[in-house]
Image: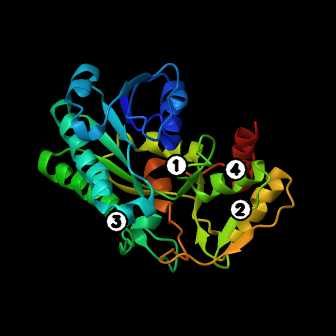
């Protein structure tokens, strides 16, 4: 099929683009390269450098994609707190621009949303119908994007899908920029520098490998709309994660302790049974195997 991947030169988007190409699809990447990297874009994909907020009508008119995998976003929680207007401009207005570009062509949108930032504190694995309690503008803007997709589904009888990702990690996640904790830990170990653990390290997350996320994202295409969690259903504490990172890196470096950060979630984990049941998807890469592959890519 013909597919557009917004944010396809970024971390997760590049994995989605690769998975599409691997099965023989035609891929056009739209990325403004503000955080994505040209070298992340697979060679066989067309790369269009553009800002989603400026409208993509011309690109959609030329490509006429069956599906648009919408991963372009502002993803830094701290940036969203410091500049909620910029966060909303990209994650809300940018998503509306993509919806409008897709509408004349009947293009289905598969939207990358977030689990932890939407559900807030979890006392058990959060299912899709759990209470939504975002603590930062980032979670609010992603939730707004989901609601716009749902409204378009009702208004125009489209079949757009939202995917709530867990804490995604894997190759090409930048350890020096805004990154997940896995890339930060492994990047520090590669530089032989001790990373910091904020608080006592007991806070937990649901870490899911980028390759598994790409498979789930492709599986969502063709669904009749809806919202799906994409994670593992397994909690791992920061302390446990660092020990696993040290094992794959062969390091004895001790982490430095730092004060707990205000507003940080203490527990975040997703119930992924709906994705298993309706998408026929389940995570396949264990944390140890995923960390090993990620370490090899960073240390190379």
Classify mark 1: helix, strand or loop.
loop
Q: Secondary structure at mark 4?
A: helix
Label total for image:
4
Q: How is the image coloured?
A: rainbow
User: Is disc 1 surrounded by few (<14), some (14 to 19) or many (20+) residues within 10 Å?
Assistant: many
Give the label on residue 137, or none: 3
Residue under pointer 1: 281
Residue matched to label 2: 195
Q: Nearer the viewer, mark 2 or mark 3?
A: 2
Residue 15 visible somewhere in the drawing: yes
Question: Disc 2 to disc 1, how far (Cα)?
Answer: 34 Å
Say if 210 sits above or below 254 in the image.
above
What's the CA distance linking mark 1 and mark 3?
Answer: 30 Å
Q: Which residue is mark 4?
A: 187
Depth check, mark 4 against mark 1: the one in front is: 4
Decide which of 185, 293 is in the foreground and name it. 185
Q: Nearer the viewer, residue 210 or 87?
A: 87
Mark 2–mark 1 CB contact (< 8 Å)? no
Label 2 vs label 3: CA separation? 27 Å
Secondary-structure class at tag 3 = helix
In front of the other: 20 or 298: 298
- Position of 253 with respect to 295 (left or right) is right
Looking at marks 2 and 3 on the same chain, the residue that comes earlier in the sequence is marked by 3
The quarter of the displayed image where residue 39 is located: top right
Q: Quadrant of residue 221?
A: top left
Callout 2 crowding tier (Cα within 10 Å): few <14, some 14–19, many ≥20: many
Residue drawn at x 48%, y 32% as measured from the top left: 17
Asked whether disc 2 touches disc 3, contact meaning CB atoms under 8 Å apart, the reply is no
Q: Secondary structure at mark 2?
A: loop
Q: Position of residue 231 (x, y in %)?
A: 54, 58
């Amino acid at each position: 099929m013909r597919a557009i991947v917004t944010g396809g030169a970024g971390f997760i988007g590049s994995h989605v683009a690769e998975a599409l190409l691997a099965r023989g699809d035609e891929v056009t990447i739209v990325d403004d390269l503000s955080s994505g990297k040209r070298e992340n874009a697979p060679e066989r994909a067309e790369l269009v450098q553009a800002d989603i907020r400026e409208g993509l009508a011309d690109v959609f008119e030329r490509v006429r994609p069956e599906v648009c995998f919408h991963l372009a976003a502002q993803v830094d929680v701290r940036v969203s707190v410091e500049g909620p207007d910029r966060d909303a401009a990209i994650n809300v207005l940018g998503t509306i621009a993509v919806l409008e570009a897709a509408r004349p062509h009947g293009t289905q949108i598969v939207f990358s949303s977030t689990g932890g930032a939407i559900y807030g504190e979890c006392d058990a694995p959060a299912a899709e119908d759990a209470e939504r309690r975002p603590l930062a503008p980032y979670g609010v803007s992603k939730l707004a994007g989901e609601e716009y997709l749902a409204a378009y589904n009702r208004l125009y009888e489209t079949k757009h899908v939202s995917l709530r990702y867990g804490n995604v990690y894997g190759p090409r996640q930048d350890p020096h920029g805004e990154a997940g904790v896995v890339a930060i830990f492994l990047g520090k170990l590669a530089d032989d520098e001790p990373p910091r653990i904020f608080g006592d390290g007991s806070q937990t997350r649901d870490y899911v490998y980028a390759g598994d996320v790409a498979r789930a994202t492709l599986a969502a295409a063709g669904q009749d709309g809806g919202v799906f969690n994409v994670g593992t259903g397994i909690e791992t504490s920061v302390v446990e994660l660092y020990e696993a990172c040290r094992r794959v890196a062969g390091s004895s470096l001790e982490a430095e302790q730092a004060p707990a950060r205000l507003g940080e979630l203490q527990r975040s984990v997703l119930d992924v049974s709906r994705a298993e049941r309706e998408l026929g998807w389940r995570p396949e890469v264990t944390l140890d195997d995923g960390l090993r592959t990620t370490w090899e890519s960073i240390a190379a």
